[in-house]
Amino acid sequence: MKAYAEDPVLLRNLGKPEVRTVAGYRAAGGYRALEQALRMQPDEVIEAVKASGLRGRGGAGFPTGMKWGFVPKDAEVQKYLVVNADESEPGTFKDRVLMEHDPHQLIEGSAICCWAVGATVCYIYVRGEYVAPADIVEEAIGDAYREGVLGESVLGSGFRLDMLVHRGAGAYICGEETGLLESLEGKRGQPRVKPPFPALVGAFGKPTVINNVETLACVPHIIERGAEWFKGIGTDERNTGPKLYAVSGHVERPGTYELPIGVTFQELLDACGGVWQGRDLKAFIPGGASAPVLTAADRDVRMDFDSLAKAGSMLGSAAVMVLDETTSMLQVAKRVAKFFNHESCGQCTPCREGTHWLELILQQGTHGIGSHREMDLVGAVCKQIGGNSLCALGDAAAMGVGPIVAKFRDEILAEIAAARPAGHASPLPVLQASH
Amino acid sequence: MSEPVAEGRRGLPPEAREELHRLRPLYPTARALTLPALHLAQRAWGGWLPEEAILAVAEELQLPAAEVYGVVTFYDLFHEQPVGRHRIRVCTNVPCMLRGSAEVMATLGELLGVEEGEVTADGRCSFVHFECLGACEHAPMMMVDDTYHYDLDRETVRSIVEGLE
Ligand SMILES: Cc1cc2nc3c(=O)[nH]c(=O)nc-3n(C[C@H](O)[C@H](O)[C@H](O)COP(=O)(O)O)c2cc1C
Ligand code: SF4
Ligand code: FES
């Protein structure tokens, strides 16, 4: 594993296989936060998470404590926690690292959440490709049952909690929270219309909290070290805590980096050993394929929710893709478009047809077909998709593809011209978007 | 509704049914077992889901076969066509593309002598490109059956493929 934090919080147990058992995790200081939480009133736990400023690490950055507060207090009603471990946003791999290296940290955070909102069943929805991470979490859950951390009476408190791994089967859209719920219920993972929001009508029609793996991994530390400590890390009171950045692409040392939220991109890049092979930076995508691309000129931006939004992009899942000076932006744009075309669930016409056309237009470009007209068309299609689709995948496609073409238009046009076969002003091969 | 198991048609193997019975109390509906059941069925039917397997799942969960079929077609890890004994999925999303996934695809084509999506004549392997597999720090990478293989180049791809039975 590759990770390089000075004083890690979330990754403190990295590379210590003994923490995969309850005994080993306890020896490393684990499960004290859960004990402490069980001595608190559920509302006090929610207040602490609210006070910490923790915002969701799955992509949208919604305040976690507030989300928990929306769950009805009615003790009679069945409630669920669903952990979003679908992690399929291109460039993202931090949740895999958390599950592989410290499964009990996730179990502890999830158990604290369940206590806080009164959920008695927790499903951990792991993407189907993550066979090994799911196995590791499943084994840890088994051990937690044997050691009395889960089951009949959590740590002897009388609070009953069941937890289990549910394996997905390969579909990015199942990371979208309502697509995930449909999938968990055994259906095609097609997102639902909101409202109602899952906090009121979620899994199996019951109030449900959905949180990302990393979000929940923060929770034990907030309980144990306090909201003030958590708030003391980061840019300001809206962007708090330690953050995992999954850095990939053209850097010397790709990996999961734990740093205070709000480090600048340049600081992060330095931590990764810089751009590889001594090359220069051309661009970077700061938050997964859904995030608008930024250019080398933006390198001093702070990598937090609000600073990236101000810079016209987003933190998203904090999957940072670094593109060096030799990168073909046409190829990157085409690949991103291909991804969204493949993953669109097909419910909404703008998203289904729009992503198809985006891939086609850019695919054509790689065969030498395309001019200003096609570049304008990309912009127009993105505009049609954005805001006209049921879930955020449509917007993500527009944000992921549109800005690459807008910001690197001349370069892409030059690439298209260079790809044009000699002697053909406008060849017209039969093109088909791939699935 | 699902039809009774026809003469000569296989149902889910007993171990799979046992596993589903173990899981049943953990979910409020039987339908929630659709994905677990399809995973089990796909393993039992050699890596893909012929009609027989889909009918067996529908029967077991008392669901309309058409609905189970609809689920199968939605997910990339469920196959309606025969696959090789070993299924190779090569990540070609941006981070892997930036570090050489095209070479991994080309190498597999050469080594196996088939196009993407085809099964080798001996039924041993099939390979496809795939979306981000969530291990981009080790790009380029691929998944062979249930196992991730990291930091690939021509040589590592060759030795992995040669090691497959
Ligand atoms: C297309 C799409 C894919 C998503 N994929 C994921 C994912 O893989 N993991 C995740 O945690 N959140 C994902 N999200 C965000 C979830 O919808 C949801 O906001 C999140 O799980 C809430 O948890 P959090 O508040 O802890 O971040 C995705 C959203 C969209 C629109
Ligand atoms: S926006 Fe796209 S992915 Fe989302 S529901 Fe509509 S078609 Fe499906
Ligand atoms: S892009 Fe290949 S694993 Fe993420």
Image (tube, coloured by chain):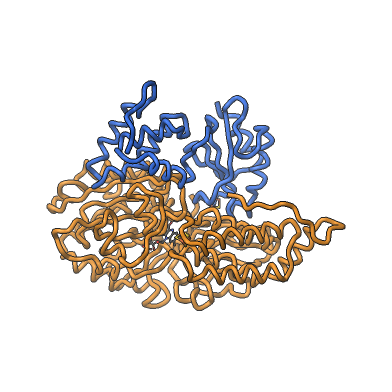
Chain colours: A orange, B blue
Front in this rendered view, residue A386 or A408: A386
A288, above or below A229, in the image: above
At x 53%, y 77%, the residue is A311
Horizontal side, residue A240 vs residue A37: left or right: right
Residue A224 screen position, x and y as percent? 26, 63
Front in this rendered view, residue A70 or A324: A70
Horizontal side, residue B58 vs residue A248: left or right: left
Question: From where the camera sits, is residue A242 visible?
Answer: yes
Q: Residue B157 is drawn in which quadrant?
A: top right
A378, above or below A13, in the image: below
Q: Residue B57 is drawn in which quadrant?
A: top left
At x 70%, y 58%, the residue is A364
Residue A141 screen position, x and y as percent? 28, 45
Residue A84 screen position, x and y as percent? 37, 55
Instruction: State the count of labels.
Output: 0
At x 55%, y 67%, the residue is A398
Horizontal side, residue B28 vs residue A261: left or right: left
Q: Residue A426 is drawn in which quadrant?
A: bottom right
A189, above or below A47, in the image: above
Front in this rendered view, residue A373 or A34: A373
Question: From where the camera sits, is residue A263 visible?
Answer: no
Residue A245 screen position, x and y as percent? 48, 62
